[in-house]
Structures are given as C-alpha cells and as structure tokens.
Image: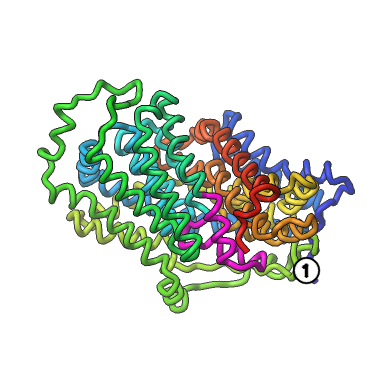
Amino acid sequence: MPWLQVYDPLNSPLLSTLVAALPIVVLLGLLGWGRISAHAAAALGLLTALLAAIFVFRMPVTTALAAAADGAAYGLFPIGWIVVMAIFLYALTVETGQFEVVKRSVASLSPDRRIQALLIAFSFGAFVEGAAGFGTPVAISSALLIGAGFRPLQAAGMALIANTAPVAFGALGTPIKVLADTSGLDEMLLSQMAGRQLPFFSLIVPAWMVCTMSGWQGLKGVWPAVLVCGGSFAAVQFYTANYMGSRLVDVAAGLASLVTLTLFVRVWKPRDVWRFDNEAAVASSIETQADAVDSRWDVFSAWFPWALLSVCVFVWGLQDVKTFFDKHTTVKFAVPGLDQQVQRNVEVAVDAKPEVAEYRINWLSATGTSIFTAAVFSAIWMGVAPFVFGRVLLRTIFQMRHALLTIALMLAIAYVTRYSGMDATLGLAFTRTGVMYPFFAAMLGWLGVALTGSDTSANALFGSLQRITAERLGLNPILICTANSTGGVMGKMIDAQSIVVAAVATQQTGNEGQILRFVFWHSVALACMMGLLTLAQAYWLTWMVPG
C-alpha cells in the first residue's frame, strides 16, 4: 500500500508552507550568506529536508532515505558526468596549448569583453542548451569565458544570466514535451505560447548581461551588437516555436544569433573597447596581429574540439539516436523502498497513481558520454598521448571531488522534497492568490527550477497542478501551464546545481555563495517581469494566447 502524500500536515496552510520551505531556506541561506563550504551547506539542507519529511510530513523513514539515495545517484550520473566531461574537454585544450589560440581568435574578432560575452555566453551557450541542456551550457560557456580572460565571478555570472531565455526549449524541446505529458495539453500550443513570451526576454537578456558588466554607459556603447544578438535569436525563436514546434528552437536560434553577430562585428566596431578595470589598456598593436600570429589552419584546429563537441551533443540529442542507444545499452532497476511507495494526492495530480522510481544508467545515450566522445576524438586530433589523456582525466575528477559531492547532496534534497510532498505544499500556497495567480504561476515555475535545478523537472512537478488551478479559476490552462516553464527559466541561474557547476568551471570552488549573491536579484527581477507579462496576457493581451 503506497504512502499518500499530505500537503497540510499541521492543519495550518501557513505553518505547513513554512516547514516545507525550510530545506531550501537553509540551503540557499547558508550557501549565499553563510561562511561554510557548499557541500556542508548542502548536507545541512539535506538533514533539514529529511527531518521535515519524516517528523512533520510523516513520510516513512525508509522511503525518505531511499529518495535521498536516488537523488544523490542522479546527481552523480548523469548530471555529474556531464560537468566532469565538459571540464575535462576544456582541460585537454589547455594542456595542449590550443586554448591560447582560441583566446587569440576571439580577441581578433573583437577585443571588447561585452561582445565576447554575447558571443560565448548567450549565442553559443543557447545553441549548447538547445542540443544538450542539463547544465552543459553553463559548464562550457563559463569555462570558455574564464579561459578567454574574464574574471572568475564575471564569467560565472554571465554564463548563468545568459542561460535563461533558451532553457524552456533546451535539450531539443524536452521541457515543453514533459509539460505536455504532465498537463495533458497540446504540445504545439504550449510551444506557441512559450514562443510568444520568451522572445521578449531574448531581447532583454543580452542587454541585461551587458548592463551587469559595464553599466548603462557600457550598453549605450554596444547597443547595435546587443540588438543584433538578441533580435536575431528572438526572431528565429518566435518563428520556430510557432510554426515548427519545440524541438529545434534553441539550436536554430542559437546558430542564427552566433552567425549573425559574428558577421556583424566584422563590419561594425564599438567606438571604445571595454575591458575590466583590472585589465591593462587595450594594446591594439598586439590584438590586431592575432590573425598574423595564428594561421587560419591553426585557428580551425584550435576550434575543432568545440565544433566536434557541438556536433556530438546535437547528434546524441536526436530522438532516434537516443532511442537506439537506450534500447541496446541502458541498465535500469526499480529503486528499493521508493518505487511504487509514494502516491500524490488528487489536489495536485489529475489521476494520482503510485510514483514510479526507476534509476536508469543510460551510459551510452547520456549527454556526458557525447562530451566524452568529443574529448576522445579531440585528443586524437590534438595528438594527446594516452598517458596524458588519463592523467588529465584523473586530475579533473580529483579537482571536482567536492563539487560532485555537493551536486549529489543538492539532488538528494530535491528528491526528498519531491517525494515527501513538500514541493506540492509550496505550490499550493501560490494557488491561493486568486486573480493574481497568473503572476504567481510564473513564480511557481521559478521556485520549481530553483528547487530541482531543471525546467524539465519543474514542469513534471507542477504541470498538473498548474492546469488544475487554472481551470478552477477560469484561466486559460495553456497560458498558465506555459508560465510554469517560462517563469522557471529565470530560476535556472540560482539553482544550486547550476551555481556549483559555474563555480567548478571558473575555478571558484568554495565561492558558491558569492556567485549566488551575484545573480540572485537578477533572477528575482526577471522572474517578476515574466509574471507581469503572464498577468497581462491573462486579462488584457488575451489575443496573444494560441488556441
């Protein structure tokens, strides 16, 4: 007999909600404003989650422990596997000296840090998000930025802020597909609705990044490039989402933005080159000689590993390829003590059934394996000896030991929160906001991603709840359910998983709190803006809602 979740165990919505919020408050509070390491903060957050689940929400002890173990395992594979491989590929290019050529080629295209951030963090990062998702763009973009000479905090912050507008269509449209499956709504209509919200933010986010780096004066100096970068992405994002579906939105828009901006900055240059305060004045005589120092073949050879990475993650993301790999290589088993042992209440699920808890070791179809494959072929291309290859791999794993522990603990918190029903308790608190619910529908998505680290997971958690609430309040369920995903993307920059990934990629392990403080209010502000847009579309701009 499965254990039935209880969402108001204290017979007081306020008190039950406060208890449900404790794990995330402890985690983010200690991470952002405490003076302890990230893995220690995560351990205390997990302890809080277990105590609340067992003693307040009355979850069986064995089930709670099994949920924590399942989450920790998922944190190590496939999430940790992605992060380790992304850093490993970067380390190989540094080891061989190829990354120095990459840095010079970027400087030759534009020595301006604002344009470099737009190219790497937004345009290239969006393409990687579309092909792979699940933390890959943050790991790769922040590593590229730090290697290109950005300050560690700025590199992490730019990668996190940029990884917002593309997230709802990440991993070949997986979040929208899961939202459709969970809510029972038409996938094409959800894609169209997201395509009528996110393009506004695709224009805003590049400008937001530049303002964060260089202030309003910095934005004024480079606004044509910002408009080209965000405008090309937004236009393709709108068209693809509305007329072709969700699968290739980010891939197409990211490539369009990358190519358009690259061509644009070849014919347009900002009047003043902007750099960080601690950098020396621009030595134009050196930077303009980058093409002379490195031949076209040298530049092609240095960028080949990153091109190979893009190809691999895209191919691995194709449904036919993933299905073939899964069919022949995936090992899966029911999680003891958890599978079929928990059932959601009808308050949050249309047809509540016992939850399936199955751990899958899809070692060949995993995104991390695509990056490892790119690393192997890149090593052959760069002439890396097998001994050096193994040495760099072991060094990367050793350097990331604390980060892997942190990611495992973070996902353990997310799984305990989910299976205990605390996530639903938090979600139900938002449903009591009446006519303001469209605003809070987006904020609920934001909370879901902050809790789980994934827009896909947040849609799986709250998609059904959003539809139930919309229909009870007489709101359009297409709009409200989509807001869960589009509001959720703004929480991507503050979820603990992304913070840890950014810290590792920029060699700031131990400074996760500083990164969180850097991006936190940006996340809140953008989420509120999405909430206001959803509110306007619910009551005044109803013509924008498809169907």
Quadrant in which the N terminus appears? bottom right
Residue nearest the observer in this picture, 3 or 463: 463
Q: Is residue 509 visible?
A: yes
> Mark 1: which amino acid?
Pro
Where is mark 1, residue-wise? 2
| Percent coordinates x, y for residue 44 in the rendering | 65, 41
Q: Is residue 57 left or right of residue 241?
A: right
Q: Quadrant of residue 217?
A: top left
Viewer-proximal residue among 303 and 2: 303
Q: Residue at x 22, y 39 (%)?
A: 267
Relative to 363, does residue 202 appear above or below in the rendering?
above
Q: Colour scheme used in the picture?
A: rainbow
- Residue under the image location 62 percent in, 34 percent down: 30
Sort mark 1 into few (<14), some (14-19) or many (20+) by Cα contacts within 10 Å. Answer: some
Range drawn in magenta: 169-198
Magenta region, main secondary structure: helix
Asked if the stretch drawn in magenta spans residue 374, the answer is no
